[in-house]
Amino acid sequence: MNARDVAATAGPAIDVDRLNKHFGDHHVVKDVSLRVQRGEIFGFLGPNGSGKTTCIRMLCGLLTPDSGTGTCLGADIVKESARIKRQVGYMTQRFSYWEDLTIRENLDFVGRLYQMRNRAEAVDRALEDLGLAARANQLAGTLSGGWKQRLALAACLLHEPQLLLLDEPTAGVDPSARRDFWEELHRLAARGIAVLVSTHYMDEAERCHKLAYIAWGELLAQGTAREIVESVGLSTWALYGGNLVELGERLRGAPGLAQTVAFGTALHVSGPDQAVLSATLARLAQAEPALRVERIDTKLEHAFIYLMNRASANEAAPSRAPISR
């Protein structure tokens, strides 16, 4: 039995049911239910303003939900928020540490906030584990985005939490640093640590064990990447040749077609009715012999674009039920 299996026997790290949050007349989070197992990397996706950050802040005790119930690491999210704050590691969207302090001084200060008895030992361990030891005396303000990210993660892990809540942690970080960061997340998950991470990057979404997609405060889908792709029920084709921009404009509103997305030298077209869309593309190929039409697998990005477009179209009066696995 591996670390993830052992951790799962302790019960879910996050288990919340029908959370709601209003800011004035604005209903920001609407009946959101989530379950994240220990040792699991759970991706949280959605457009800006969709409610991701508000959800995360309710989970870590920084915001109190207007209604709904649940636990975080076994603690009640309403009645035991102080206990939760001490047991989770929370990484905000923006770098929130002190730029006029060194890396070591930042970590030592965080250790003081947590009143850690073995503070110096924990700081040394964090510096070593995150590859920061050689830069320990460098001012945080002089670090690149990738190194600031490592410092923020080291600070999150200093008090040895069993749950990390990471709010768009790789925004503005170069691809190499993003790759290293995700390798570290998988190492942490293998030790039984649960990770809830919000991201806009599809390659990062595909590295998660499970995903949830939220838009306008509602969960539209959750499950594994394969489950979400299957749940939207799209069929997808790639079109090659001709002016793709013009072709995409001409195809709008065509029978069976739900979306067109340019991918490099191809135009990807998708729709929920395979037979109708196939007939539409057959007629198009017959009228334009230079056009090549090829059936392809629907990918996670196609599914999320479809979900986002559908949510935007129904924002004024959403009436759909979440797709849940």
Image (cartoon, rainbow, N blue to C red):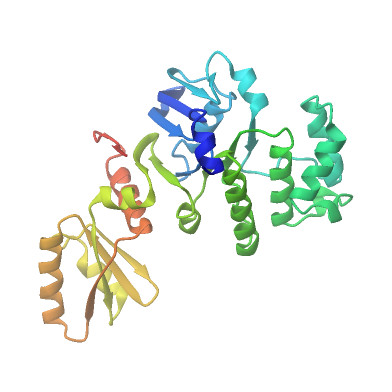
Quarter-of-image position of residue 273: bottom left
Would residue 119 be visible to someone looking at this image? yes
Q: Report the residue at 32% width, 45% height from top.
A: 312
x%, y% of residue 298? 30, 61
Residue 306 relative to residue 92: left or right: left
Would residue 46 be visible to someone looking at this image? no
Report the front residue among 310 and 325: 325
Report the front residue among 220 and 308: 220
Residue 307 relative to residue 41: left or right: left
Up-down relation of residue 270 to residue 157 (above or below): below
Q: Residue furthest right?
A: 137
Report the front residue among 237 and 242: 237
Placement of the C terminus among the 4 image quadrants? top left
Quarter-of-image position of residue 17: top left
Q: Residue furthest top?
A: 79
Residue 292 relative to residue 216: left or right: left
Report the front residue among 135 and 239: 135
x%, y% of residue 292? 23, 81
Up-down relation of residue 221 to residue 118 (above or below): below
Q: Report the residue at 73% width, 43% height from top.
A: 154
User: How many marks can you see?
Assistant: 0
Up-down relation of residue 311 to residue 29 (above or below): below
x%, y% of residue 2? 54, 44
x%, y% of residue 277? 15, 63
Q: Report the residue at 80% width, 47% height from top.
A: 127
Residue 187 relative to residue 38: left or right: right
